[in-house]
């Protein structure tokens, strides 16, 4: 995956909170308590990519118990990340470019259907973070909070995806992860998230929501090299290779419920606990999005065949 050297970046779509990270005083998002350490680990793992769908059923802890001092400091990012040339050499800037491209696509797509896309920032945090959905630690993985319409990610997740999940990694894998989270934002804007009633199980609404977010990620990828940059300049993304797509599919296959339960959760696959879909389903819906480039093909709520 390469970026166009001359395309301009919009760093206002990112909020860098890493310099004030770690603000959650030992509390995690899970309500209720009583989970064993192993249970917690499995829970977190199963919550990867989950956004709020992964946090379902657990009331987020309030904002009251989070330490103060968390703040956004975009000075470094806005200094370093000006063009696609910077994105080609600097990891932070590459993520800015990806986020710009994803939101650029949805802005245009919403406009084409007579709707207005509301921009949503991605927060880079380290350790812990306050959100409109409560406080969270990095252990929950990247997520989208519908209450404040923002994406949150501790970038160490990308390392974890390789070291713990065995994924091959790469910039486009990270783009897939971010595009999935923005898929949840699109669902929030369209009111789809409100349709979720059943939160666990192989054909649950939660699984359908997650697979649709994977499909939306693929839809963006289909249009990535033709989506203009924020200032209407040349597309931010110059090319996406077959290898990029193969790696993203590999990653999708490692965050399926069955893979995670089997490889990281003790070996037993329990469909009744599915929240995100199987590896095969995640690959299928991401592929559907990439090949069709059409959000209408992502209607996972109406199909009887999730894959
Ligand atoms: Zn998700």
Image: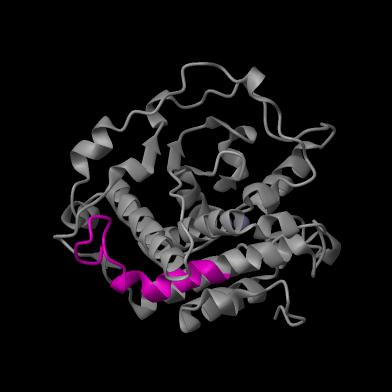
Side (left or right) of 178 relative to 88: right
Q: Residue 228 falls in which quadrant of the image?
A: bottom left
Residue drawn at (58%, 24%), measured in percent from left and top? 24
- Residue found at the far left of this picture: 6
Check residue 224 for magenta coloring.
Answer: yes
- Residue found at the far top of this picture: 68
Residue drawn at (54%, 31%), measured in percent from left and top? 129
Looking at the rendering, the quadrant in which ligand 1 lies is bottom right
Side (left or right) of 77 relative to 36: left
Q: Quadrant of the C terminus?
A: bottom right
Vertical order, 238 against 48 (above or below): below
| Residue 157 horizontal/vertical position (percent) | 50, 47
Asked if residue 170 can be seen in this view, the reply is no
Asked if residue 111 can be seen in this view, the reply is yes
Vertical order, 69 against 203 (above or below): above
| Residue 174 horizontal/vertical position (percent) | 43, 58
Q: Quadrant of the N terminus?
A: bottom left
Residue drawn at (82%, 59%), measured in percent from left and top? 198
* Nearer-the-camera pick, 270 or 130: 130
Side (left or right) of 86 relative to 213: left
Check residue 169 for magenta coloring.
Answer: no
| Residue 273 horizontal/vertical position (percent) | 81, 58
Magenta-drawn segment: 215-236
Vertical order, 80 against 127 (above or below): below
Residue drawn at (54%, 44%), measured in percent from left and top? 149
| Residue 184 horizontal/vertical position (percent) | 58, 56
């Amino acid at each position: 995956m390469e970026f166009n050297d001359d395309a301009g970046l919009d760093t206002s779509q990112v909020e860098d909170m890493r310099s004030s990270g770690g603000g959650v005083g030992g509390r995690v998002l899970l309500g209720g308590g009583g989970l064993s350490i192993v249970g917690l680990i499995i829970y977190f793992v199963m919550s990867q990519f989950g956004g709020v769908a992964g946090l379902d059923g657990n009331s987020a802890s309030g904002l009251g118990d989070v330490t103060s001092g968390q703040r956004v400091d975009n000075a470094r990012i806005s200094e370093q990340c000006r063009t696609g040339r910077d994105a080609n050499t600097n990891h932070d800037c590459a993520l800015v470019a990806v986020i710009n491209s994803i939101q650029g696509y949805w802005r245009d797509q919403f406009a084409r259907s007579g709707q207005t896309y509301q921009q949503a920032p991605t927060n880079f945090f380290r350790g812990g973070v306050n959100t409109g959905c409560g406080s969270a630690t990095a252990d929950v993985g990247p997520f989208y909070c519908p209450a404040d319409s923002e994406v949150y990610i501790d970038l160490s997740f990308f390392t974890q995806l390789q070291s713990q999940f065995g994924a091959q990694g790469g910039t486009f894998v990270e783009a897939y992860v971010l595009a999935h989270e923005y898929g949840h934002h699109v669902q929030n804007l369209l009111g789809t998230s409100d349709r979720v009633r059943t939160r666990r199980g192989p054909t649950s609404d939660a699984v359908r929501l997650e697979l649709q977010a994977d499909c939306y990620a693929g839809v963006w990828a289909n249009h990535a090299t033709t989506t203009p940059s924020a200032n209407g300049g040349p597309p931010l993304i110059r090319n996406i290779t077959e290898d990029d797509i193969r790696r993203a599919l590999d990653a999708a296959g490692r965050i399926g419920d069955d893979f995670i339960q089997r490889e990281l959760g003790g070996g037993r696959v329990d469909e009744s606990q599915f929240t995100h879909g199987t590896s095969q389903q995640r690959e299928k819906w991401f592929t559907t999005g990439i090949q069709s480039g059409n959000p209408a093909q992502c209607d996972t709520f109406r199909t009887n065949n999730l894959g």
